[in-house]
Amino acid sequence: MPPVAETVLDEVEAEGGEDAGPGPRTGAPARRGARAAGAAALLTAVLFCLATALSRSHPFGPVTRNVVDLGQQYLPYHAYWRSFLRGETHGDAFLNWNSGFGANFLGDVGTYLSSPVDLLVVFFPADRIELALYVVTAVKITAAGAAMAALLLRLRPGPWPVAAALGTAYALSGWTFNFGSTVPMWLDGLAAFPLLCLVGEWARTGRRPVLGPLVVALAWIANFYTAYMATLGAAVVLAVRLLTAEETATVRRRLAGALRAARSVLVGVGLAAPLVAVVFLGTKTADPTPEVTFAPAAWTDVLARFLPATASTASPALFIGTPALLLALTLPFNRAVAPRVRAALTAAVVLVTLSLQWEPTHLLWHAGASPNGVPYRQAFVLCGLLLIAAWFSVAGGVPRPAALLAGGALLGGLAWAARGSVDIDRWTFPASGAAALLALIAALLALAAARREPSGAVGGNHRDSTGTAPEAPTGDNRENSTATARQDSARTALKAPARPARLLPLLAVLLLVAAQAGEAAVTGKRIEEQQRAEVAWSPRTGPWHEAAAREVARADAWPRHRTDPGEVPGGNDVLLVGGQGADHYSSLTSETTSRTLVSLGFGAYAKGRHPVTLDNPVTDALFSVGTRMRSEPVEPVRQDAPPRATVTATTVPVPPLVTVRPSARPAGPSGDSAFARQERLLGASVYELPAPRRTGRALAAHCPAGSEVWFWAPEYRGTATLAGQRPVRFDGKPPAVSAAMGALGTVPASGEVRIALDPEGRARLPREPVGCLVRARLDTAVDRLTATGATRVRTTGHTVTAALPPGSTGVAVLAVPRISGWSCAAGDADLRPARAYEGLVAVPLDGRADTVHCSFRPPGLRLGGAVGAAALLALAATGVLHRRRSRG
């Protein structure tokens, strides 16, 4: 863009940065950076909201945004986070009593909630949690755009409006719309990438030795998973800068810069260790997902994802806007950019693109484990590299026509090669074509403005009369002269006559912004619409959730007994409405929790990481669920309206949270069915377990009259119908979904049990699929456990203390899955790692202790704390040494 005298001087000052010397000059680049960051933030926020409004999604429309994990995980977790921050939960930062009958909350905080932006939820009312999460999402995306705009001006001076437009292009990339906006925790990595690149710049030039590690720590605390990817990406950018920048033209300076960067990363990650270690060890004990073998996407689909309005979870989301992509493609042909810079940046973009498709580098990007679901989670790094390439090509002025033609040819070839991809949408080519046309007009206007520029002024591409870049020192500043020459050029520009008109460059910028903005809005709109049509979704929160929350609050009697909210649409019910149920959907769901509950007849989704509630009187007795909510929808659940239902609460006598069993080894029926496991844990035989006869699609058996028929087949998908009763649906789909045990009805007076099966596909049944529950036996077992169990139970955030009848022997059993981190003691003994009793927390008793005490500490907290303390000392030492050097 043609400069004026003030712009030229600002660019000189930006080139020198803070090292250019004291005085008022240092304020100019800061102002330009602030303008770019502010403009990028504003434009990003407006366009993100516009895309949401165009798709008629909440909060700008009636349709739910809660697709897949946004509704199943992130919305409930943010609802619980709000309650936790306001002191409204039973648990503390260590333990969540609401989920999974007791879950490691600090691990979930580090996975989902540790971003500082997530604290914003505390300012919203409970019934506006969807709006709160949308604001959190928008703020993270906006911050990413601002950070990228500021980084671009730090990497190389140039017109701040263009930097703002490219920052917005980064924030509203296809990755953001397709993945990040529905997985808000990943958005912290989107913002972390430009910030970590900035840390690399500080390390390269020997500046900010204390602030750099703090930025690294913030990124890794906010979300260490995507921060790891962003760190790898920032290392690529740093390598390019070390090889091309004239400040690091010697081997010694390059090595020193690399070592300073490594120090910043090590100290920063060390500062984050108290949280990162807890999450890391939590993943080691989490329910394992099936191993995934990486299969690279077809290159046709990869190329298609550079284009607008494409969506897929099987290929990398790489859209950054046609104008920005065109500028990036001109870099290899732009002779105004130093050859070394062109070669290094082009090689970086090509190699990172190839790394997405090669299994060893795919595993490197994902810390050694190919993820389930989205296999290209690191694609935001490539989007950032492309925009850095675009900036280096345009910062000195619009590329010459030859470079524009070459880049346009590459873009056309890319679009032609992608035309057969299944990811191409009906909006793709119209949106891309319109944006390309606007970008072409903008380029022509900018070139015309450059020709009208006074000959004495410095700017544009700094070309000489032949149209080629003048000779200059090596490095990315080759198109510029030395610092002295730059100052002389600025003085010359100050004496040059003012530009006769600003209209052409202004129009060029407006057209560039319009092209980027239009494509981004269309892409966001289409991706949201496609996701709602093709993937699982949850309804908006509303009257159903509010009614359940009111009933839970009214009936809550914790820790005397648990209150289970039952089934509420959306999943993770207890995090949304309260209570202490089994529902828990987390990447860190313990394998102990998942396997214990599924073995007892509970259902599970997400390959075991989402156990769900089970409305069964035996498991209610085992886990002290005294109050259970049951909901009856009053209308079909829809995408465009919050659901409504009537909610009722039923309270029954159950044993206390801590019971006493006669021995460490449970007695009871043998067998591996869920019915037999329930009985062993209960210590009583409460089911009749007939050997059903299977004839075609029917089961026949004999049970006591009046008993309740329960059907258990974790892998069964279809309906099962007891004669004379309504069909009951089961949704087993191994390995992703385990069907929960379900009640079919009451055994008639004849004692004959006939069950009609209507499977979808092959009916896979266990050896004992039918159990007939005799309520009188269960009542007797409950009375016995109540009489011998705890007389008083007290809980704090992460501890349980129970008073037992004098002389109790055997084993005290706490109705909590024995996940890693529990320590217990009887009487005044020291805490020791808890024992296990059929998967639950257990404490041996010798008849002398009349109390038991258990406490939970997240694994990894002590190790992480030690590493964090060492990193803090290292940071303090670094600061002291830097201050002494500065004084010297």
Image (tube, rainbow, N blue to C red):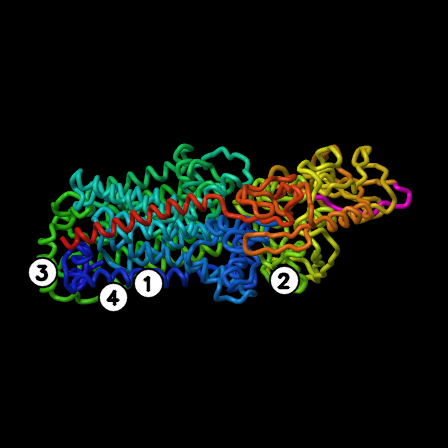
Q: Which residue is mark 1?
A: 39
- State which tag comes first along the sequence, 4 or 1: 1
- State which tag comes first along the sequence, 3 or 1: 1
Q: Residues within 10 Å of mark 4 (few under 14, many from 20)?
A: few
Q: Residue 131 at x, y = what percent? A: 51, 63
Q: Nearer the viewer, mark 2 or mark 1?
A: 2
Q: Which residues are magenta?
A: 741-751
Q: Are marks 3 and 4 in contact (CB under 8 Å)?
A: no
How many angstroms separate mark 3 from mark 1 (CA)? Answer: 30 Å
Q: Residue 257 at x, y = what percent? A: 22, 43
Q: SS at mark 1?
A: helix
- Amino acid on which disc 1 is placed: Ala
Q: Is residue 137 left or right of residue 643?
A: left
How many angstroms separate mark 2 from mark 1 (CA)? Answer: 42 Å
- Amino acid on which disc 3 is placed: Thr
Quadrant for residue 506, please give it: bottom left
- State which tag comes first along the sequence, 2 or 3: 3
Q: Residue 329 at x, y = what percent? A: 30, 45
Residue at 45%, 42% in the rendered image:
280
Q: Residues within 10 Å of mark 1 (few under 14, many from 20)?
A: many
Residue 492 numbered tag: 3
Q: Is residue 219 left or right of residue 803?
A: left
Q: Nearer the viewer, mark 3 or mark 1?
A: 1
